[in-house]
Amino acid sequence: MLLISTYLAQSSIEGIGVFAAEPVARGRLMWSLNTKFDVFVHPHEIEGLPPHMQDFIARYSYPHLEMPGVVIVDSDNGRFMNHSLSPNTDFRIFDKGYALVDIAVGDELTCNYHEFDPSFRGFFAVPPPAKTNGRRARANGSSAKR
């Protein structure tokens, strides 16, 4: 459950993101696992759901690291937190999330999915080729004119 005020808006990362509606100081506890707001879903419950709800759970859930097979779906704006390899939050403690930096009102909240989902493999199989002002990047870091 998010412990700070947030809002949803268009994200430059992916679709909709969650944004800080209040300043958040570095080190502040900003999320805590709460079974009233973070729903535990067992595998046998997913199997009986209609396909669109199975898709919803697959998109918005993450594994419970201490209960094999169980996934968690946040019922608040937390489910819209986008992935970043340079996040502004820290979720390395399974049931807690902290601000890594001072977060201003309007900043998108991001987390590194690898911290709480060991099966996360990223979104891009092959990174797009780097380009520099109409030049193609070489393996050694220099660029060649096209």
Image: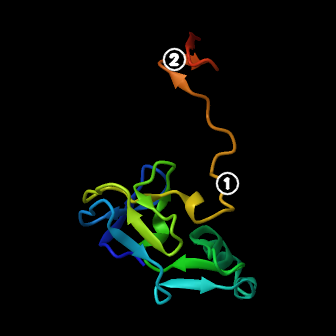
| Left/right of residue 30 with respect to residue 121 in the rendered view | left
Answer few, some or many: residues within 10 Å of disc 1's Cα (few below 14, many 20 plus, some between 14 and 19).
few
Q: Nearer the viewer, residue 62 or 14?
A: 62
Quickly name the residue at label 1. 121
What separation in Å lies between label 2 and label 1 (alpha carbons)?
A: 31 Å
Residue visible at 36% across and 70% down in the picture: 30
- Pick the residue in front: 43 or 118: 118
Q: Is residue 14 left or right of residue 103?
A: right
> From what the image shows, is residue 56 above or below residue 125?
below
Discs 2/1, front: 1
Q: Quadrant of residue 103?
A: bottom left
Q: Quadrant of the C terminus?
A: top right
Q: What crowding class fits label 2: few (fewer than 14 Cα within 10 Å), some (14-19), or many (20 or more)?
A: few
Instruction: Give the residue type at disc 2.
Output: Gly
Residue at 32% x, 67% y: name it: 28
Residue of label 2: 134
